[in-house]
Image (cartoon, helix red, strand yellow):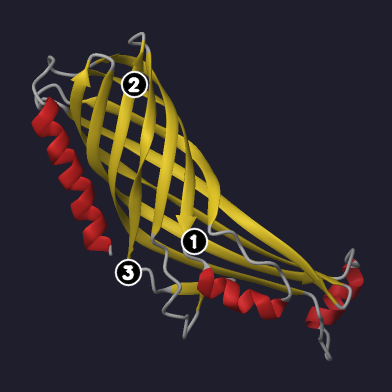
Amino acid sequence: MRLLTIAATFALASATFGQFGGMIDRPMGAGAGYVGQWIGVDVDAINDELAAFGVDDLSSGFYGSGGTGMAYIGSLKGLRVGGVFVSGGTSSTGAVNNYDREARYEYGFGGLTLEYTLPVSRSVAFSIGATIGYGGSTLEIFSNNGPYNWETEWAQTLGTNASTDNIYRKFECSYWTLAPTLNVDIPLYSLAYLRLGGGYNLALADDDWEADNGVRVKNMPNDINNDAYYIQAGLIVGFFLF
């Protein structure tokens, strides 16, 4: 699936370039701005466990936001170098025996962007490229039954007969990422441009999960992975000529 996604993205870009390449002069400019993404992650394996915990399923899609910036490299026609960072998340809640329960899932990544611009006209261009960087996923689990009492909590957690039904767990995983991307850039009076597109974020070596204060988590289900597709829109402010 990963290889097919990459191959399809680059095949589409190659076909586009063959049809439109060479129509206008060398693109130039630089800028930075906001980017919003709809991120899709497979959380089915997590939801299987959460059903017994008493909360609703986590959504497999959620909104993420961040920033991006880029500049054309004058010595290489059409090449654009920059960076991007995005984060977002989803949560679900429930109640069991008077205990409020919640699960939170957060996803984020950032890195270096390398793109090649393929102008269709002076009012639109395709950009094919990749993002190479670092990302992370976090799953937090909560269970409590109301306001805490300072003295009671210390007694329940540190006392001779320590015992509490309040629960907090934090699972984290960090990994390198590689995302082939395809975007459409629409200039706005040379001072900004609108970006529409997407990509598929491949999480590399993402099987090393940790809990709470860095304790290794063994036997994580193989179905839990951090690959994600994303659809994005952004507004980039600067100076651009396509």
In the displayed structure, would residue 88 be above or below residue 163?
above
Q: Residues within 10 Å of mark 3 (few under 14, many from 20)?
A: few
Residue 80 image point, x, y percent: 22, 30
Secondary structure at numbered mark 3: loop
Contact between marks 1 and 2 (CB within 8 A): the answer is no
Query: Residue 137 bears which disc, if any?
Result: 1
Q: Amino acid at mark 2?
A: Ile
- Tell me the CA gap for discs 2 and 3: 36 Å
Q: Which residue is mark 3?
A: 205
Q: Quadrant of residue 222?
A: bottom left
Secondary structure at numbered mark 2: strand
Q: Amino acid at mark 1?
A: Ser
Label located before the other in sequence (1 or 2):
1
In the displayed structure, would residue 149 be above or below residue 130?
below
Residue at 44% in and 30% down: 234
Query: Residue 186 bears which disc, if any?
Result: 2
For the residue pair 149 and 217, the one nearer the viewer reads as: 217
Q: Residue furthest top?
A: 189
Q: In the rendered image, which quarter contains the C terminus?
A: top left
Disc number lying in front (2 or 3): 2
Residue at 39% in and 74% down: 207
Contact between marks 3 and 1 (CB within 8 A): the answer is no
Q: Amino acid at mark 3?
A: Ala
